[in-house]
Image (tube, rainbow, N blue to C red):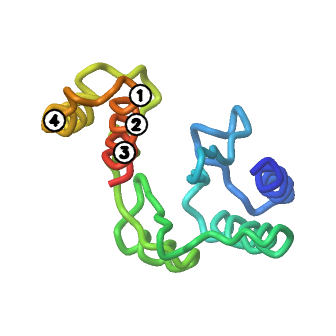
Amino acid sequence: MECFTALLMGRAEGGGFIFHPRCQEIDLVNVSFVNDLFIMCGASDASLRVVKDTLELFGHILGLRPNLSKSTCYFVGVEVVEEVRLGEILGMSFFSLPVRYLGIPPTTKQLRASDCRVLVDKVRLKIESWGNKQLSFAGRLVLINSVLFRVCNY
């Protein structure tokens, strides 16, 4: 993913790309997690074409192509008609905020316990329904990890 970031940053500096307003000061264009990639940019044709071209170049170089049917665009402060048009540039479905990632709303502020309450309640409900009294500590750990994975990837 460092290769993708370098490609995107190089293309962003080359012109046409508009940084997301809250990301320009720190030159942030993307954040990646295990199997997820968040690309932040201004909602313009030029920016999305730079992103699309960079994804295609990255796929050509490394053979790693995003699954566009599983990919989603999120827009903030954009009219619905414009969302549809911009989403078509990338060939992805689109949604409006608020959104939840792994069951928790993404935020720039520190998470509160109440923000995670739904996730904690789901995990607790699954764990308490098990007949886990006969399981070893390691067995319980495996079950908890399995539930966390399923709950967070719904």
Who comes first in sequence, dot 1 or dot 3? 1
CB under 8 Å between discs 2 and 1: yes
For label 3, the crowd category at 10 Å Cα-Cα, with few meaning under 14, some 14 to 19 and many 20 or more, is some
Q: Amino acid at mark 2?
A: Val
72 relative position to 52: left or right: left
State the SS at label 3: helix
Q: Quadrant of the C terminus?
A: bottom left
State the SS at label 4: loop
Q: Which residue is mark 4?
A: 131
Label 3 and label 4: CA atoms lie apart by: 22 Å
Label 2 and label 4: CA atoms lie apart by: 14 Å
Residue 96 x %, y %: 35, 58
Q: Amino acid at mark 4?
A: Gly
Q: Which residue is mark 2?
A: 142
For label 4, the crowd category at 10 Å Cα-Cα, with few meaning under 14, some 14 to 19 and many 20 or more, is few
Who comes first in sequence, dot 2 or dot 3? 2
102 over 95 or under it: above or below: above
For label 2, the crowd category at 10 Å Cα-Cα, with few meaning under 14, some 14 to 19 and many 20 or more, is few
Q: Amino acid at mark 1?
A: Ala
Q: Residue at x 26, y 36 (%)?
A: 119
Q: Which residue is mark 3?
A: 152
Q: Amino acid at mark 3?
A: Cys
State the SS at label 1: helix
Please tell me the numbered disc located at residue 101.
Answer: none
Residue 133 x %, y %: 19, 26
Residue 56 x %, y %: 74, 74
Q: Residue at x 58, y 74 (%)?
A: 90
Label 2 and label 1: CA atoms lie apart by: 6 Å
Q: Which residue is mark 1?
A: 138
Q: Residue at x 23, y 24 (%)?
A: 114
In the image, 65 versus 126, the foreground residue is 126
